[in-house]
Image (cartoon, rainbow, N blue to C red):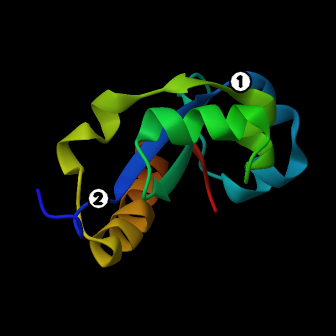
Amino acid sequence: MSRRHHHHVYVVALSPLVLDEARFRKANPDYVPGRPCVYVGMTGLDPDLRFDKHKAGIQSNRFVFTYGTHLLPELYEVYNPMPYAAACEMEVELAIALREAGYGVWQA
């Protein structure tokens, strides 16, 4: 693997309590009750390390810090690693695909 292909997309499971947040509900008008709520991100770090940083409050997304429970590698491992530009695109595409599947999605 070349050094330039070290970016990753990742998906964090969020507690269903995130649905109590008006901003999250507003961003997910087509959410199907009972489907998972997730955060989709992109990083140059290993996804496990990035998740740990979120939970420690380091460059953390508020929803991941408060509601993040664990990573969902089955939703993203197939894509990683990739170049930066591809990771930027995949972050958006994956969020859209999960939203279309009825997930509640936050993507920064």
Rendered view: 57 above or below 13: below
The percent coordinates of residue 73 (x first, y second) are 34, 30
Residue 18 or residue 43, whichever sits in front: 43
Tell me the element at label 2: loop
Q: Is residue 31 left or right of residue 49?
A: right
Residue neighbourhood size for the residue with mark 1, other residues' Cα within 10 Å, grouped as few (<14), some (14–19), many (≥20): some
**Residue drawn 84% across the image and 54% down it:** 23
| Residue at x 51%, y 36% (from the top left corner) | 49
Quadrant position of the C terminus in the picture: bottom right
Judged by depth in the image, the label closer to the viewer, 2 or 1, is 2
Residue 55 located left or right of residue 37: right
Q: Mark 2 sits on what residue?
A: 6
Indicate the amino acid at tag 2. His
Q: Residue at x 33, y 78 (%)?
A: 85
Point out residue 86 in the picture as x, y percentages from the top left corner. 28, 72
Q: Position of residue 90 (x, y in %)?
A: 33, 64
The quarter of the picture where residue 76 lies is top left
- Residue identified by numbered label 1: 16
Where's residue 53, x and y in %?
65, 39
Q: Residues within 10 Å of mark 2 (few under 14, many from 20)?
A: some
Q: Is residue 86 above or below residue 50?
A: below
The one of 37 and 83 positioned closer to us in this rendering: 83
**Which residue is outermost to the bottom?**
85
Q: Is residue 78 visible?
A: yes
Query: Viewed as shown, does residue 25 lie left or right of 86?
Result: right
Name which residue lies at 25% across and 39% down: 77
Q: CA distance from mark 2 to mark 1?
A: 31 Å
